[in-house]
Amino acid sequence: MSFHLLIRRVHLYLGMFLLPWFFVYGVSSIPFSHAEYFQQRYGRPQWSVRFERPYHIEAPPGADLRPIGARILKDNGLDGAFGVYRPNERTIEVYRFRFGSATRLRYRQDEKRLVAEDSHARWNHLLTELHARGGFDQDSFLNDLWAVVVDMVSIGIVLWIATGIYMWWQLPQCRRWGWAALGGGGGLFVIFLATL
């Protein structure tokens, strides 16, 4: 097999392998770009109270919130991937997410009270979760595996682009239109980057 044929095969099969990811990232960009439309059409996510109870945990200002969020989940019989942040000095919010649903725990330090609410994701919320999910900060094999696959997809996309450019360069009759496409896409990107 010649090098040129190898590049063509890599480009072809890599594109087929990456097809589900291109589809997911392409379709899931729509709810991000048109968030106001989806909120008008479907409303904001509806949260139903799972429980509200007295609770106390030490969370001094400036403390690492990750172990605090993990402890809040564990103390209340919950587990899974989560994010934690402090919207103000009196409140800690833990957001436990799955592709199909989410649970939000809001701890009010001044009241020593914890409220847990559940939301069942709508399809547009599911798409944005698929688009944004990644990272190695969760203590779970499957979440880490998802992050590894996302890294592989990112490398695959770069390789797919490189093989496409190589194949384009091998066709002299297409170079003029190729330069126009590269220049148009790159120029538009630079304009947005400089002005937004």
Image (cartoon, rainbow, N blue to C red):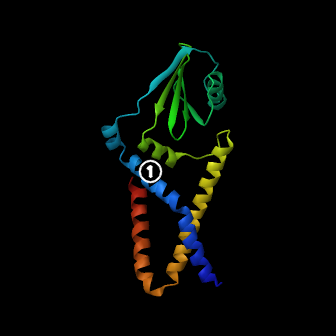
Residue 105 image position (x, y, % from top left): 54, 25
Q: Quadrant of the N terminus?
A: bottom right
Residue 172, compared with residue 159, is above or below; it is below
Specify whether residue 182 is in view.
yes
Q: Residue at x 40, y 79 (%)?
A: 177
Callout 1: SS: helix
Q: Residue at x 66, y 49 (%)?
A: 145
Quarter occupied by residue 153: bottom right
Q: Residue at x 49, y 85 (%)?
A: 171
Query: Foreground residue, 120 or 183?
Result: 120
Residue 178 image position (x, y, % from top left): 43, 77
Residue 151 image position (x, y, % from top left): 62, 55
> Looking at the picture, which amino acid does disc 1 mark?
Ser
Q: How many marks?
A: 1
Query: Foreground residue, 194 or 3?
Result: 3
Query: Foreground residue, 152 or 178?
Result: 152
Kindly identify which residue carries mark 1.
28
Q: Residue at x 65, y 22 (%)?
A: 75
Residue 33, compared with residue 54, is above or below; it is below
Is residue 162 rendered to the left or right of residue 64? left
Neighbour tally class for label 1: few under 14, some 14-19, many 20 plus, Cα within 10 Å: many
Residue 52 image position (x, y, % from top left): 52, 16
Specify whether residue 162 is in view.
no
